[in-house]
Image (cartoon, rainbow, N blue to C red):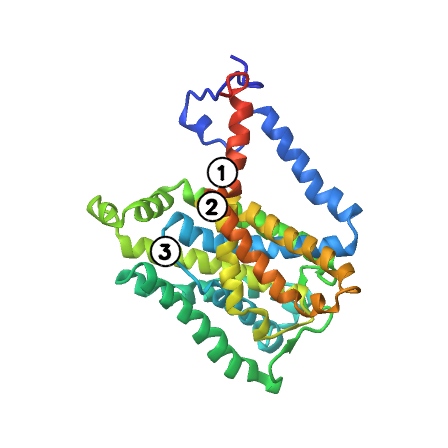
Amino acid sequence: MSTTFLPCGVYHQTYAQDHAWWQTPFIKAKMLALALILFVVIPMFADMYWISVCNQIGYTILGSLGVQLLIGFCGQLTLGHAAFIAVGAYTSTLLILEFPWPTFMIDWGIAYPVSILVAAVVSGLWSVLFGLPSARVKGFYLILSTMAAQFITVDFIITQYVSQIGGRGQAFSLPPGTIKMGPWVIDSDVKVYYMILFFIIVCVTVMANLLRSRVGRAWVAIRDNDISAEVMGINVLKYKLMAYFVAGFIAGIAGACWISNLAAISPEHFPWFWSLWLVGVILIGGIGSIHGAIFGALFMVLVMEILQMIVMPLSDIYPKLLMDFLFIKEATFGLAICVFLIFEPNGLAYRWWQIKNYFNLWPFSY
């Protein structure tokens, strides 16, 4: 049987076929077209405004991947993920500005890539620290312990102590030319776009492969029923803390990447609402799916940009709209979550799965 077109369904005869990334030439062609759009079409034809929107989408995807891992795949509720992004951002910034790097590492552009790796590890370990209560508590109490991470990390440690290092006050400015990866000076939105896109591909690939491994199956078993998982011989605490570390690791990468898009970094860039926003992203995109983090980020960022396009012209007639735009944005966020929970509780990823199945099963899609 030809595997170019699979008639009405999917026919796999081996485990390798069932778990292949791209199972048919048609899917490979789709992925090639997607790569062409992401790497060529968008950078060449989009203006700087839409490139910055793409960067915001990429940052949201990186931030929500860790939340998806914790909530969607391991069943660990979290409302303090912005704290771990902040740890990654500040660790990378301090390493670049304060650490006495050898001259050759600065000249060769090695300092920033190393700072990203260190920031990811530090953020992962910090996440594990606040994941320890998951050994004893669940549900509402676990939410409170993760919220504590936000207030302890950002509002106390970073604001009162870390931000004072070097006598800078509240903000760390990153001089032009500071962010380098090899000979590549990241000094424009297009270069930031390529860097964030690279890290999205790496993080999604690593996370997808982890979920197909013994570790991923253990996370899903804990999510479904941690008591049954423990009876089956799974070390529940070990795998929970591993999930917190991986989620924090990805958050650290997100924070370290985002500083390349900022002229200065301050605690105001990591409010508690950002943690809530990331949870909303995976609720809308679909819990328990990597696609959910991507679709949710696309939906939320684009909806807010469209909302801004609508409000800005109207502000000439109703000036108060511009003053209240932040509240309008938050209200829209809440309304979107309510609408999806009522009409599409499985999120956009489930709808995408249904659309693919429709074409896979055609002409017997019923």
Residue 76: assigned label: 3
Residue at the outermost front position:
317
Left or right of 174? Residue 3 is left
Residue 342: assigned label: 2
Residue at the outermost left position:
231
Q: Amino acid at mark 1?
A: Tyr
**Nearer-the-camera pick, 83 or 241:** 83
Query: Are the residues flagged by discs 2 and 3 in contact, CB closer than 8 Å?
Result: no
Look at 44% across and 22% down and name the residue there: 12
Q: Position of residue 106 (x, y in %)?
A: 66, 69
Q: Position of residue 291 (x, y in %)?
A: 52, 43
Left or right of 318? Residue 327 is left
Left or right of 39? Residue 285 is left
Q: Is residue 188 above or below residue 297?
A: below
Crowd around label 1: few <14 · some 14–19 · many ≥20 (10 Å): some
Look at 62% across and 84% down and name the residue there: 168
What kind of element bears circle 2? helix
Whole-angstrom CA distance, mark 2 to mark 3, is 23 Å
Q: Amino acid at mark 3?
A: Gln
Q: Amino acid at mark 2?
A: Ile
Look at 56% across and 57% down and name the residue there: 333
